[in-house]
Image (cartoon, grey):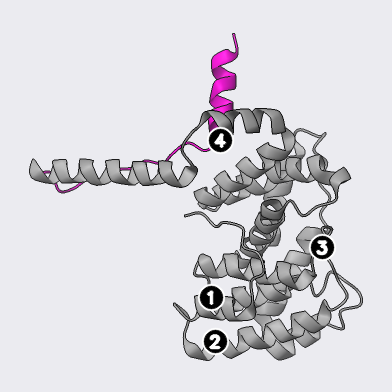
Amino acid sequence: MSTPAEHNITIADLLNRAKAYLPADQLPGIEQAYAVAKQAHEHHARPSGEPYINHVLSVAQILAAMRLDGDTLISGLLHGTLKYPDTGVNEEILREKFGEDVARIVRGTTRIDNVKFNSLIDYQAENIRKMLLAMSSDIRVLLVKLADRLNDMQLRDFPPDKACEYARETMDLYAPLSSRLGIDWLKRELEDRAFSVLHPDEFNNLKSRISSSLQDRERYVKDVKELLSKKLYQHGITKFNILGRPKHLYSIYKKLLVQKSP
């Protein structure tokens, strides 16, 4: 699975994706959450200047692409409401309008935002990963935060002077967390996008040398797996599990570094 960056997502786009798998009675809560978020972030903008409401719609869309439950989508829309002091939204309002689960998830993502990460301390990343896992008694807290970070990296939506620091945090903290949660496609995308910021020359050189896109390589792996499955069935072998995935750019880069080392 991959989740490409999408621009100018509307609430209609989100509802269309959500109604493909959620019960109809969960859609009004998503619409209500959007209305609350839109009012709360009326005067807020991302570092790029884009309205903040566009970001929360994108986060919720990523969560919907993962087919997560309605409360998680609502939390994605509302994840920034406790971050700013002028939103007019607090935990009590969230709990009253959307329930305890949503209030807990939004509170948890806000607490993660307040965790300070120092990439100069080598051992700290693992300690922080353990702390975030301990803080997130509800795994949906981390899923919302990972979707938030993915959209930031997709749009490179961070202050220019903080780009490398932000990318390093993504590489050392959020990509490994994705792996620990078993979301390999998310780990790969976060790594590649952080790689493009931290080592732009190497990234562009490697990208130019690989003629096929990740989607093409994923399709190739799928075709090979189907061919192998067919051959195994033809020979009477019915119990098997074929695993395969294309290497992403950062993985290829690391392999090249190992091959060059003495």
**Which range is magenta?**
236-262
* Residue 20 drawn above or below residue 31: above
Magenta residue check for 247: yes
Mark 4, residue position: 249
Query: In front: mark 1 or mark 4?
Result: 4
On the image, which quarter does residue 139 sit in? bottom right
Image coordinates of residue 225 in percent, x first then y, are: 28, 43
Query: In front: mark 2 or mark 3?
Result: 3
Nearer to the camera, 138 or 162: 162
Q: How far apart are marks 1 and 2 (CA)?
A: 9 Å
Query: In front: mark 2 or mark 4?
Result: 4
Mark 2, residue position: 26
- Assign a secondary structure to mark 3: loop
Mark 3, residue position: 46
> What's under tag 1, amino acid-wise?
Asp
On the image, which quarter does residue 81 sit in? bottom right
Image coordinates of residue 205 in percent, x first then y, are: 62, 28
Q: Are marks 1 and 2 in contact (CB under 8 Å)?
A: yes
Mark 1, residue position: 69
Can the viewer see residue 126?
no
Q: How far apart are marks 1 and 3 (CA)?
A: 26 Å
Residue drawn at (75%, 85%), measured in percent from left and top? Answer: 36
> What's under tag 3, amino acid-wise?
Arg
Question: Relative to 96, is 179 on the left or the right?
Answer: left
Question: Relative to 61, is 117 on the left or the right?
Answer: right
Q: Distance between the residues labelled 4 and 3?
A: 28 Å
Quadrant (top left/top right/bottom left/bottom right) for the C terminus: top right
> What's under tag 4, amino acid-wise?
Leu
* Residue 105 drawn above or below residue 167: below
